Image (spheres, rainbow, N blue to C red):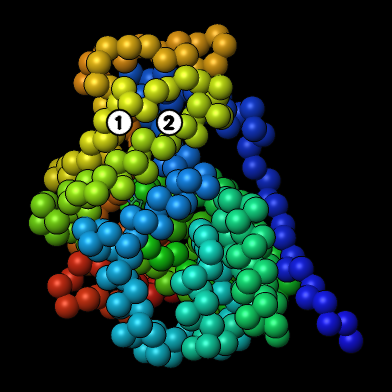
Amino acid sequence: MSLALELPRLETTLRLPAQDERQQLLHGLLQTQAHIDSKYFYDDRGCELFTDICRLDEYYPTRTEAQIFSEHRDAIAAQLPRDLQWIDLGCGDCGKTLQWLSSIKPARVIGVDIAGEFLQSSMISVAQQHPQLECVGVVSDFTQHLDLHALLAEEPNAPPVFFYPGSSIGNFEPRAAMRFLRRIRAHCGEHGRLLIGADLIKPRAILEAAYDDALGVTAAFNLNVLEVVNRELDADFQPERFRHFAQFDEAHRRIEMHLIARERHSVSLGRHTRRYFGKDEGILTEYSHKYSLDEFRALLAASGLRCSHYWTDPQDWFGVFLAEPL
Ligand code: AVJ
């Protein structure tokens, strides 16, 4: 027997060619309402800043979800099928998944993330801590394309449990969220499950503070996206010419994050394109939708998923939902 650790399997699913990705990004910046997809937040610096956000006093979602998980872990695990395959969507460093392994004892762990190098090292660390566990990393922009059918079919007797924590579902507008949840459902078969976290409606002041903290970490996170765009498009955004803005839109039940031009100026978006920004004109960088418990269960139902159980914290600030195919 060899003592060397075998590297975990890493697969890359089809992605848009880099050129098309850049076209989409450019197109968004040239709309009347300029926008940048939230996925561009997460370069190395952005991942670091997001980790810092999760530790802020004002940013309650991560902490609240972690409390719900630690309080109800055994009750949740008891509702999951035996010999499951655990699919962590947007696994990052796999920190959340690691906390589940001893309770759920999965047949296999599949970590899916858009950041490939980071994913490789995350899966290595899971494999080192659990040498008997089969670990697969899938590099994928799963919000655009989710096709794990062939991979899941390798273990036909291990029902998939999709883990989508952190209220990342909030980035989707409700219709797109439904389409995404339907794609998850299509992978579930009879015994598959979805364990998902969603941030809940609460007073505006608490929501807005969570997205505009006193230390300015969220502002730095938002502004960092301009550095990412500069690299992607060979653009010349100057972050100091923009300011962070976050606001709860009550009608749409979502936090909207924008970058607002401090003054009238223009930005080169590569060699052939220039965009003018008027003073106070904004670039939309993120939606973070908030739901009531009933609204989120209705969204699951509209996606062909029945919410069999849910758990919240004492203040009903965050919801963890377990769903199965209808
Ligand atoms: C990672 C999408 C769940 O919406 O709360 C945190 C991202 N943006 N602070 C969220 C985010 C600003 C976060 N999600």
Q: Residue at x 68, y 46 (%)?
A: 14
The residue tagged with tag 2: helix, strand or loop? Answer: helix
Residue wearing tag 2: 226
Q: Is residue 126 left or right of residue 293?
A: right
Q: Is residue 70 above or below residue 207?
A: below
The residue nearer to you, when weighing 276 against 191, is: 276
Q: Position of residue 12 (x, y in %)?
A: 70, 52
Q: Up-down: is 39 above or below 56? A: above
Q: Position of residue 17 (x, y in %)?
A: 67, 34
Q: Which mark is residue 259?
A: 1
x and y percent of residue 312 in the render? 24, 75
Q: Residue at x 64, y 82 (%)?
A: 130
Q: For mark 1, does the 10 Å Cα neighbourhood hold few (<14), some (14 to 19), or many (20 or more) residues?
A: many
User: The disc labelled 2 sits on which kind of residue?
Assistant: Leu
- Above-or-below relation of 111 to 228: below
Hey, which residue is sitting farthest right in the picture?
A: 1
Q: Position of residue 56 (x, y in %)?
A: 27, 59
